[in-house]
Image (tube, rainbow, N blue to C red):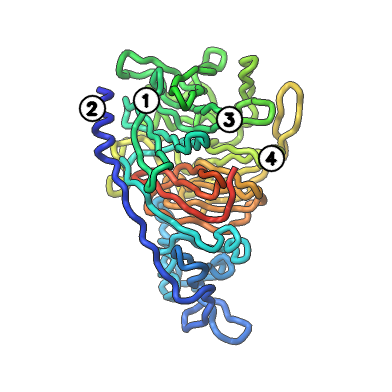
Amino acid sequence: MVSSWIAFSLGLLSVTSAISVPRDDKYGEKANNSTGTPSPTGGIVPVASPCGPSTAKIVCINRHGSKLPPSYARDPSPFVGYSDTVVSDDPSWAQVATADIVIFDKDRGMKLLGKNPKFEKMFSVLPVIHEAPVYVPSQNKLYLTQDGPPGNTSSIVIDLNPNPPTMSLFQTNPPLYQPNGGIFKDGTIYWAVMGNNASLPGGLKQRPGIAKMDPDTKNVEWLLNSYYGFSYSGPNDLAIDSKGDIWFTDTDYAYGLYVAPSSPQIQLATYRFRPSTGQVSIVEDTLNHPNGIVFSPNGKTLYITDSGLESVGNTSWRGPGDFYHYPIKIDFTSTAKRNVYAFDVNQNDGGDYLTNKRVIFQSLEGAPDGLRVAANGYLVVAAGLSRGVDILDPSGALIARIQASHAVENIAFTGKDRKTLWLVGIGGISRVQWDLVGL
């Protein structure tokens, strides 16, 4: 069964080439007859203008697009993206839909792009969630996982050494069922694993939890799978602090994706796990669906995304236009939470704890999913079921966004200089090359 599934999956992986769109002007903010903001010289500045280097299609938004012609309209469906907003009285808006990168803060946006930014779709993959991208520097390879279909125990590795990169499937020993978050630390990949005890090849039985993998041998060791006799709902993502404690979010999406047989036993929350002793402590319980998690470069701030917009429902469906490969029980509510939160991390010998919860960002589209931090403290946030990645400063101010042709669940920085960002999601894998240095 495993071998046939691997063959089936490999048949769905294909490399696609990118198209570079040239630009006539370098920083275009030319006035035209569209309805926009009056310029100091008396002309009209359009809402959107081409800008930046010609190596990617880049559009700058005037004043964050905070003032549009009153006729604008946007469908509240979470499947309708920011660029799908209808701004019929300003022709300049049409450029946003075809842009690779949208800039909201021109000074800081141009600095992070550098002189030759490039955006490329690299692979087409099965229309299911792809998650947990983890870069292993010693191999120059990117590991990632595939959420479903139910029963799948294979994962993906992208070899970045050849040009273009190549992709293949692999399986851990013993097999891991549905890892969903990952991080590399001291030569080891740590996985947040959401797959629950189900009918799997070879009689495999598993509970959700935390496992670690040697990237050279693919051998796996389980670290955690129980909260004092309760099963976790489905660990989603994880981060490791300076003490070696593993902080992880726990959600019920595994049940909605049919990779867990039952609904949650305990509340959805964020936990801190100390591998040296086995101690587990709940550290945050107010978010609807805690999802992505990352520390600031100095470790003093913890960021967690809340994808409350996406919740487990009662009816199976595949989304608009059969968006998903198989029916899932995930509902989408536009008015629910789609936020990024920041917390202060307080040092304590018994285990650090969180205070000063604050919301710093509400997603433009979809719900925030995985996130990474750059060396300068910027946050890079995947938009989940939507086709975007947002770049924020540490206070949550929006600087720029990447627009992909596929949903983006998670991201990872790669390369010796960490200036390449990979975007993994539903139906596609893409990359951006720029000057923003990741951690």
Give the Cα separation between the discs numbered 1 and 2: 13 Å
Q: Marks 3 and 2: which is nearer the front?
A: 3
User: Dot 4 corresponds to which residue?
Assistant: 301
Task: Look at label 3 and name its amino acid.
Answer: Lys
Question: Circle 2 sits on which residue?
Answer: 4
Q: Position of residue 366 (x, y in %)?
A: 46, 49
Q: Residues within 10 Å of mark 3 (few under 14, many from 20)?
A: few
Query: Looking at the image, which is closer to me, 249 or 20?
Result: 20
Label 3 vs 2, first from the N-terminus: 2
Residue plotted at (42% across, 52% down): 387
SS for callout 3: strand
Q: Is residue 382 toward the left or the right of residue 110 in the image?
A: left
Q: Which residue is mark 3?
A: 185
Q: Nearer the viewer, residue 175 or 294?
A: 175
Depicted 337 relative to depicted 10: above or below: below
Q: Earlier in the sequence, mark 1 or mark 4?
A: 1
CA–CA distance between discs 1 and 4? Answer: 35 Å
Which element type, helix, strand or loop, lies under badge 1?
Answer: loop
